[in-house]
Image (cartoon, rainbow, N blue to C red):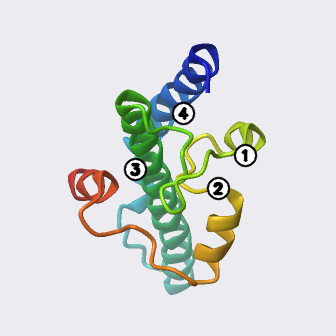
Amino acid sequence: MNKTDLEKYKAVLEAKRDELSAGLRNREDIAIEKTPDALDEVQLAGERELAIRNLDRESNLLRNVKGALIRVADGSYGICMHCEEEIKPKRLDAVPWTKYCIRCQEAADRHEFEAENADTIDDMLANAA
């Protein structure tokens, strides 16, 4: 991967990181509200559950983006963390924070190999976030 492409992906990742960081600061939707009407409480509980799921999804995505930025900094960005082959530019354009090439991602989705969870930078970020 040439320096121009790397800078392009870095800019995209930094913009995504900033966007996600700003969105995660808004946690008012998960506040527990009491109402005299039981039906309203059920509706609020459903909305709160949806907000929690969105918050979880966005925080996981933020961890992946931060991990990709660390890989940019250490020179391993664009290399599959499983097979160590170069990740195709089309895949990086679609999912710039990906850790795996499409073949290894499909295998991970089918649980054919354990994703590198132990002692990775992404775990350290997960614990920090």
Q: Secondary structure at mark 2?
A: loop
Q: Position of residue 63 (x, y in %)?
A: 40, 50
The residue that label 3 is drawn on is: 63
- Near mark 3 (Cα within 10 A), the count class, few <14, some 14-19 or many ≥20, is many
- Quadrant of res 47: bottom right
Number of numbered labels in the structure image: 4
Residue in the foreground of this view, choosing between 33 and 103: 103
Task: Work out which quarter of the rendered image holds the N terminus and state it.
Answer: top right
- Tell me the distance, in whole angstroms, between the alpha carbons under discs 2 and 1: 7 Å
Q: Contact (CB < 8 A) between labels 2 and 1?
A: yes
Question: Which residue type does callout 1 highlight?
Answer: Arg
The tag earlier along the polypeptide, 2 or 4, is 4
The answer to whether the residues at label 4 and label 1 have Cβ atoms under 8 Å apart is: no
Query: Which residue has dot 2 on it?
Result: 101
Give the distance between the C-alpha atoms of the residues marked 2 and 4, in whole angstroms: 20 Å
Secondary structure at badge 3 equals: helix
Residue 71 position within the rendered picture, expressed as x and y whole percent measured from the top left:
41, 38
Question: Residue 91 bears which disc, if any?
Answer: 1
